[in-house]
């Protein structure tokens, strides 16, 4: 009940936002929010930390950009091409990565994504260091011209909401419950007869496809695609967004994406402000060294703020309103899964 | 003389270059393996600390006129001390949590270190010249051997095998291996495990810095040199498995050689060949070449 009101408020804010803030900035936020939600499906609800999500985000961006610009495909087919390719990359990467558990899984995804980075660096159609420039927006279903920022904003909002709804539906579906079981105790899920590898792979592909949708949309919005989007630092950035917002919470990644994108955009101003009040001139250069700040936030989050913004808020409200006594859950001594 | 239409000279020099790269892979993956064994943390910052070692060597020479040989000893000590501070103040709080948090923390440290060095020195490389005693090359008859590259291979082999010896053959190493298996029991025998953990991290990190100083004259010293390397080293670790010290050393060297040969026969693939091998190994032997099936 409470959630519904919050969702309604968020939707209302999203609808009026482009009249207050710059629409392109908002669209960028939406794309990253969808990206982070897709990533969170894996880390927060399946317990798999992928450090290779840039491969989906950037890979789909390149494919969509190429389809729109060189082949002249319409908007919706361009996005679809991006999503399909991202899903295929997910299938390949996932089927290799799930062969190992825990920390190895993370290293494998990172290495495979780096491989795709080198492919993009050398392949002729990506434009190498220059990137893919001048991607046209085209029109929706051949009728609605997307050149107008405001029109495109509402389309992007619809895409993001659809993606988010799909994630919510997935999590609450029986399939999502199995994923949760895998996260909590993998050996037990296996012993209950679930083909854990297949569930993991499916979650990986789904997460990759949605990340691809976000990447393809972002390419259309900004009109270009560069190597930044396939670089490992992009994979790190989406981890950070999810971590800041709250791992394993539904709204967390959205909040995290808003915070991080806004911070990146406003860091120069913040640096100037800090320099003005502290008198240390070095702060002025902070705008150019975003990595220092992101690194710092990473460290603080991991050490002291592991629940993230939404996680902390939820913990606060839970403490403020003591819940009705829960039916005493059987405190069976379930051995925690040891991961190697 | 030619082999498959490629002059022997060119092939041998690429092979040597591959061996040089391989020794860096070996030293870094060895450090990662030792740290992971005892701390259960994948040290993402390994690349950044390798970069720091190289930068300390460069700074020592540029600002204070301290020569290569002293820095070869001093830089690992400094970086090792820095590592101990990291372990004592930050990593220590994460041991009870999921391994993933250790990776994320060290990732954050990597970003900060890289960003700091970048804000001072930019992204372009700083040249560091080969120390005088090792300049020039020796003519072996069938190839010209650059002295410095030979030194890198020899020095890193010595360090790697010394590490192997200490861990596998001495009493200290026995404590360490016991600590990897069952830290609680080892502590019950009166051994100061937390201290051992701290020192292990310091040592592993110092090894990375040592590799960094060795690398400084071979590649230009730049803030990004570490992160480019560390991802390849991760692939090396996945291929070799972290269970065995000797396994890490051999995998590192072997992959360096493979990479060097690829550069001769099919240069376009040289950046990705390690990742391709990783994919193949995962398909055939998921636990890694030297890993144990669990």
Image: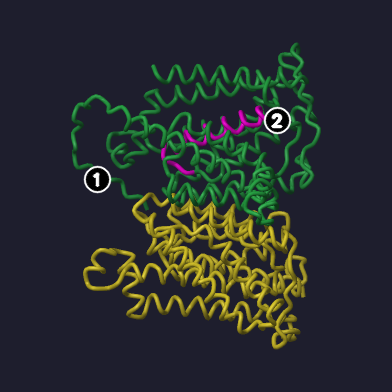
Q: Quadrant of residue B183?
A: bottom left
- Magenta range is A25-49
Give the main secondary structure of the magenta stretch. helix
Q: Is residue A41 magenta?
A: yes
- Is A105 on the left or on the right of B155, as rendered? left
**Residue tagged by mark 1?**
A335
**Residue tagged by mark 2?**
A64
Residue at 28% over, 45% down: A336
Q: Residue furthest bottom?
A: B133
Determine whether the residue tagged by mark 1 lies in a helix, strand or loop: loop
Residue at 54% over, 69% down: B208
Q: Tell me what hue chain A is rendered in.
A: green
Q: Tell me what hue chain B is rendered in.
A: yellow
Q: Is residue A78 magenta?
A: no
The x and y percentages for residue A201 are 47, 36
Q: Chain of mark 1?
A: A
Is A112 or A283 nearer to us in this picture?
A283
Q: Residues within 10 Å of mark 1 (few under 14, many from 20)?
A: few
Residue at 81% over, 32% down: A134
Coloration of the structure image: by chain
Say whether residue B56 is visible: yes
Is B72 or B264 nearer to us in this picture?
B72
Circle nearer the N terminus (1, 2): 2
Marks 1 and 2 share the same chain: yes
> Cα distance, mark 1 to mark 2?
46 Å
Task: Reply above or below: B53 against B66.
Answer: above
The x and y percentages for residue B128 are 72, 74
């Amino acid at each position: 009940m409470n959630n519904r009101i919050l969702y309604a408020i968020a939707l209302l804010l999203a609808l009026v936002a482009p009249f207050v803030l710059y629409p392109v900035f908002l669209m960028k936020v939406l794309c990253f929010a969808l990206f982070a939600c897709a990533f969170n499906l894996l880390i927060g609800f399946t317990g798999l930390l992928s450090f290779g999500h840039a491969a989906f985000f950037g890979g789909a961006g390149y494919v969509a950009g190429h389809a729109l610009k060189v082949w002249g495909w319409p908007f919706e087919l361009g996005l679809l091409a991006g999503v399909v390719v991202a899903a295929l990359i997910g299938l390949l990467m996932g089927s290799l990565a799930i062969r190992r558990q825990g920390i190895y899984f993370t290293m494998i995804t990172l290495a495979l994504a780096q491989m795709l980075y080198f492919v993009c660096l050398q392949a002729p159609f990506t434009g190498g260091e220059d990137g893919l420039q001048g991607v046209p927006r085209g029109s929706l279903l051949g009728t609605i011209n997307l050149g107008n920022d405001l029109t495109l904003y509402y389309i992007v909002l619809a895409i993001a909401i659809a993606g988010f709804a799909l994630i919510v539906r997935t999590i609450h579906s029986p399939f999502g419950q199995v994923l949760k079981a895998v996260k909590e105790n993998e050996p037990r899920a296996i012993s209950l007869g679930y083909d854990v590898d297949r569930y993991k792979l499916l979650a990986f592909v789904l997460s990759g496809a949605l990340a691809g949708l976000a990447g393809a949309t972002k390419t259309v919005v900004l009109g270009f695609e560069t190597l930044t989007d396939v670089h490992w630092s992009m994979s790190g950035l989406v981890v950070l967004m999810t971590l800041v917002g709250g791992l394993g919470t539904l709204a967390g990644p959205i909040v995290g994406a808003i915070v991080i994108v806004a911070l990146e955009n406003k860091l120069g101003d913040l640096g100037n402000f800090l320099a003005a009040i502290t008198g240390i001139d070095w702060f002025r250069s902070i705008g150019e060294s975003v990595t220092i700040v992101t690194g710092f936030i990473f460290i603080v989050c991991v050490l002291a703020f592991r629940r993230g913004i939404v996680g902390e808020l939820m913990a606060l409200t839970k403490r403020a309103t003591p819940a009705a006594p829960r039916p005493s859950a059987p405190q069976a001594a379930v051995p925690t899964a040891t991961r190697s | 003389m030619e082999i498959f239409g490629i002059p022997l000279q060119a092939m041998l020099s690429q092979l040597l270059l591959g061996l040089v790269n391989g020794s860096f892979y070996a030293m870094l993956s060895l450090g990662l393996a030792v740290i992971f064994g005892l701390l259960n943390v994948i040290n993402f910052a390994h690349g950044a600390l390798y970069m720091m070692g190289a930068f300390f060597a460069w700074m020592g020479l540029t600002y204070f006129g301290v020569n290569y040989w002293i820095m070869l000893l001093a830089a690992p000590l400094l970086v090792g001390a820095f590592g101990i501070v990291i372990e004592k103040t930050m990593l220590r709080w994460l041991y009870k949590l999921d391994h993933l948090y250790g990776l994320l923390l060290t990732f954050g440290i990597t970003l900060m270190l890289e960003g700091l060095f970048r804000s001072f020195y930019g992204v372009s490389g700083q040249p560091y010249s080969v120390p005088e005693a090792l300049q020039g090359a020796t003519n072996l008859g069938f190839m010209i051997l650059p002295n410095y590259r030979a030194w890198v291979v020899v020095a890193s082999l010595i360090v790697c095998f010394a590490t192997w010896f200490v861990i596998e053959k001495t009493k200290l190493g026995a404590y360490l291996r016991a600590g990897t298996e069952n830290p609680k029991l080892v502590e019950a025998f009166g051994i100061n495990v937390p201290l051992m953990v701290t020192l292990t991290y310091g040592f592993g990190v110092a090894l990375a810095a040592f590799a960094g100083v060795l690398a400084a004259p071979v590649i230009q010293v730049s803030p990004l040199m570490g992160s480019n390397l560390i991802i390849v080293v991760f692939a090396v670790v996945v291929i070799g498995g972290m269970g065995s010290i000797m396994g890490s050393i051999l995998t590192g060297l072997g992959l360096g050689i493979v990479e060097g040969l690829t550069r001769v026969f099919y240069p376009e693939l040289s950046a990705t060949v390690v990742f391709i091998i990783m994919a193949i190994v995962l398909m055939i032997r998921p636990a890694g070449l030297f890993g144990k099936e669990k």
